[in-house]
Image (tube, rainbow, N blue to C red):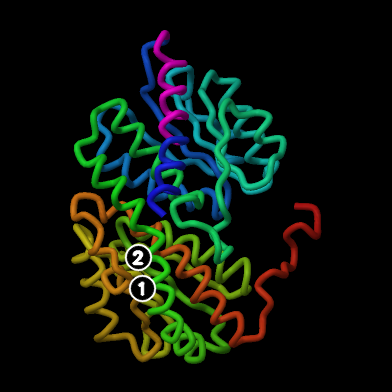
């Protein structure tokens, strides 16, 4: 596993070095933008969160593909690194990559299947689908994006905890496999308790919110056709908590680290005014605390998202008898 981790780290290192060298004559990189649609956009959350809290000289922003095409930010130019993700070359994302290139950005593409996207980008890095059990955790899109962010911080600013981050990547797949075994029976019980629910609220904060967002829009809404608002635990107290009653289904991701008190505040309220349909999935129970303390915060998404997709979503799919590979509109009608 460690050798596999070294392999992707080397690929990421070379991509970042190439980007930095290519922009040296125009004053270097000042911005990085993460562009995707749906789960590909959500998969960039860990990288964005890392950049927000560690990068001092390079600004970082996330954009959904089509919005980037129709309303590109004014700052994007030759001093910008654009990282664009699409499994099969989503048309909006291909156009976003073209837009970034037209504005002078250096573009790195993350992909599963070669497509027009891989023809447009300056460099391409293949990733493994999070939905496949055999995929290596360090090689899924969210992990590679986080790896890019960490290597960029290290190359541009000398990131102090780089070695700890590489150690965490080497641990990620083993921890994920253990977490799957831990969660399988829990997910079956949760799914049985939520059979027939029309709405499931998903909550998280800080480093875990990207996983909550993907669980809502991709797993519950897209795959299982269940209404699912995603709510930040902080914003919960500024409106959404008014819908809580003893029968309201809530799935809350509990972070381990600086933002845990934010989740615990929401949990306290839910324990008082919610009911038996409040479910907590704690990162500490998934083994996140085994990672180095200096970087574990940035790896919540890496553990949470595949567990939610491959364990909890599948358990609910089996329980309600809904084939999660079928769609009502996607790939079937004009949209």
Q: How far separated are the C-alphas under marks 2 and 1?
A: 6 Å
Please tell me how crowded label 2 is: few (under 14), some (14-19), or many (20+) other residues with Cα within 10 Å: many
Residue at 57% x, 63% y is 131
Q: Residue 19 colored magenta?
A: yes
Front residue of 71/313: it is 313
Q: Are marks 2 and 1 in contact (CB under 8 Å)?
A: yes
Residue 181, image x and y in percent?
A: 42, 78
Residue 158, image x and y in percent?
A: 23, 29
SS at mark 1?
Answer: strand
Q: Residue 241 colored magenta?
A: no
Residues drawn in magenta: 12-25
Tell which circle, 2 or 1, labels the residue nearer the N-terminal end: 2
**Which residue, given by chain and number where applicable, does mark 2 sit on?**
204
Magenta span: helix, strand or loop, mainly?
A: helix
Q: Is residue 230 above or below residue 97?
A: below
Front residue of 173/324: it is 173
Residue at 45% x, 63% y is 305
Quarter placement of the N terminus:
bottom left
Residue at 25% x, 58% y is 291
- Left or right, residue 69 beside residue 25: right
Q: Using the rendered view, name the quadrant where residue 270 is placed.
A: bottom left
Front residue of 23/220: it is 23
Front residue of 15/80: it is 15
- Left or right, residue 98 beside residue 191: right
- Left or right, residue 322 beside residue 82: right
**Which residue, given by chain and number where applicable, does mark 1 sit on?**
252
Q: Using the rendered view, name the quadrant where residue 79 is placed.
A: top left
Residue 242, image x and y in percent?
A: 35, 76
Q: Is residue 102 above or below residue 159?
A: above
Q: Is residue 201 above or below residue 15?
A: below
Residue at the extreme front of the image, as rendered: 3
Residue at the extreme top of the image, as rendered: 25
């Amino acid at each position: 596993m460690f050798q596999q981790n070294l392999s992707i780290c080397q690929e990421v290192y070379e991509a970042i070095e190439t980007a930095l060298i290519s922009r040296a004559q125009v004053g270097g990189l000042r911005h990085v933008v993460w562009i995707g649609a749906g789960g590909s956009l959500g998969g960039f959350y860990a990288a964005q969160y890392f950049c927000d809290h560690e990068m001092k000289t390079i600004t970082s922003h996330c954009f959904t593909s089509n919005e980037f095409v129709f309303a590109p930010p004014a700052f994007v130019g030759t001093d910008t690194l654009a990282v664009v993700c699409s499994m099969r070359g989503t048309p909006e994302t291909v156009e976003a990559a073209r837009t970034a290139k037209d504005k002078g950005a250096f573009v790195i593409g993350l992909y599963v299947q070669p497509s027009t996207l891989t023809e447009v980008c300056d460099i391409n890095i293949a990733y493994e689908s999070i939905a496949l059990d055999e995929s290596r955790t360090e090689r899924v899109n969210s992990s590679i994006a986080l790896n890019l962010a960490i290597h960029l911080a290290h190359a541009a600013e000398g990131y102090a905890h780089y070695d700890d981050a590489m150690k965490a990547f080497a641990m990620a797949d083993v921890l994920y496999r253990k977490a799957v075994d831990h969660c399988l029976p829990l997910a079956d019980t949760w799914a049985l308790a939520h059979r027939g629910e029309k709405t499931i609220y998903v909550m998280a904060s800080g480093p875990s919110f990207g996983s909550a967002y993907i669980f809502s829009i991709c797993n519950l809404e897209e795959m299982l056709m269940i209404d699912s608002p995603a709510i930040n635990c902080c914003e919960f107290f500024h409106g959404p908590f008014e819908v809580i009653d003893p029968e309201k289904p809530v799935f809350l991701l509990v972070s381990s680290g600086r933002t845990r008190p934010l989740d615990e505040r929401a949990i306290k309220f839910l324990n008082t005014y919610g009911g038996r349909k409040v479910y907590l999935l704690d990162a500490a129970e998934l083994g996140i605390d085994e990672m180095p303390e200096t970087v574990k915060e940035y790896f919540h998404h890496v553990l949470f998202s595949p567990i939610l997709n491959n364990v909890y979503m599948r358990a609910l799919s089996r329980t309600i008898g809904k084939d999660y590979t079928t769609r009502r509109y996607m790939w079937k009608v004009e949209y």
